[in-house]
Image (cartoon, rainbow, N blue to C red):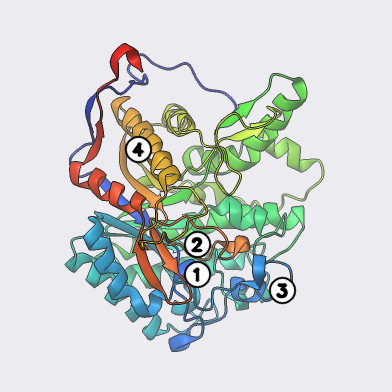
Amino acid sequence: MTASAAQPRELTRTEPSAGTLSFPEGFLWGAATSAYQIEGATSADGRGVSIWDTFCRVPGKVRGADTGDVATDHYHRWREDVALMRRLGLRSYRFSVAWPRIQPHGQGAVNQAGLDFYRRLVDELLDAGIVPFLTLFHWDLPQSLQDAGGWPARDTAYRFADYARIVFEALGDRVPYWTTLNEPWCAAFLGYGQGVHAPGIVDEQQSVTAAHHLLLAHGLAVEAMRGAGGSGARIGIVLDPQPMSISSTPEALEAARRADGMHNRFFLHPIFKGEYPDDVLADLAGHLDLSHIQADDLRTIAAPIDVLGVNYYRRLSVGTGPPVHPTTSMGWEVDASGLFDLLLHIHQTYGPIPMLITENGAAYDDNVGPEGGVHDPERTAYLEQHVRAAWQVVQAGIDLRGYFVWSLLDNFEWAEGYGRRFGLVYVDYATQQRIPKDSARWYQRVIAQNGLVMPPSEPNGQ
């Protein structure tokens, strides 16, 4: 965030010392995936075409001309993958449902074979003692809806609410955590503004309109699921707000205000305050048509939620020069302090909403060693720093209820194809063999301990 409010005395950062950094009883330790990135089987059992199926076939859009057609074949290997989760001790598993599996054209008749796949997955997770955590939309919009206008078309928000009700009525009695959207900023601005994600459109008007309709879809879906009633499920949304490192020049401060406005406050303000920030509206109104924001939309968007999912990977640097911390293979600077700063800022600005870290992880260039193992000390170090930051969040009195590593498996990494590996588990894409990395074994111990064991300090503080 561009500015941090003064920290109340009860919300201070505790520096860890030797011993166990314990987390609250019932803390959700998990890992996350998304449907298009792992499932494969893109034409199996009545699944329709998604915008990512289409985008992957546009020359030059995805590194190596990779597609999600096979991915990690989770659609056929889900029992094996749940057994792997159980061996690793996961307490929860965050996954997304593929909208084109449920409604091949994004509306109309339900594809029962698609619903049955997720029914079986949820039942297997429950049998393994793993809490299912379901995300309804992780970017794989049915192509038929894109052909009808996509997220810039208001009707798509209503179709999403219909889809949400269908899935909720099928699984709401067994899934305790539901989130509507994953990172709507990416879906809107990478997909319709920068064109680097599906559907590959470069149009600022469409991107801003899409962002509003994604938020409207969220609110309508919350209402639809509440209306289905009875389950006691906790409902929320997953955002990817970014704290910022900013130089003190006027140009950098202004750029940071705009970036914070569009990336962070554009989504957090409507959800928690029922309004768009005045400065953001003023920035946009000078050159865009904002008539898509209709009366009562913001009331719908601000429908009360039970939990906020926060995805954190890095700070956004504005005018600060070259990185001062190590970087991942994505070129992202490793700075775990940003996680604490971000969650503190959300808590202080938008109130004590229960939060979960729904994605946190790092890509490195992993290889299988001669003995058959995968040694990834950089990833283990990355995760340890961020788990420590999560402990500091809890110690500060912020209501943090879980931590999910991105990702359970190496997988299709969107426009990067298969060239970036985020997984706790290495996937040999030629054979689909799964090999837990050293980081997976480390995480297994963290979960078993319900926290980190900190070694004693060396003499003289070394």
Asked which secondary structure carries label 1, the reply is helix
The amino acid marked with disc number 4 is: Val
Which circle's residue, 4 or 2, is located before the other in the chain? 2
Q: Is residue 176 left or right of residue 383?
A: left
**Camera-nearest label, 2 or 3:** 3
Give the class, few, some or many, for how many residues have Cα within 10 Å of label 2's Cα (few <14, many ≥20): many
> Which residue in the protein does label 1 denote?
36
Which label was assigned to residue 72? none
50 above or below 270?
Answer: below
Give the class, few, some or many, for how many residues have Cα within 10 Å of label 4's Cα (few <14, many ≥20): many
Which label was assigned to residue 138? 2
> Which residue in the protein does label 4 denote?
387
How far, Cα to Cα, is label 1 from label 2? 8 Å
215 above or below 134?
Answer: above
> Which residue in the protein does label 3 denote?
58
Which circle's residue, 2 or 3, is located before the other in the chain? 3
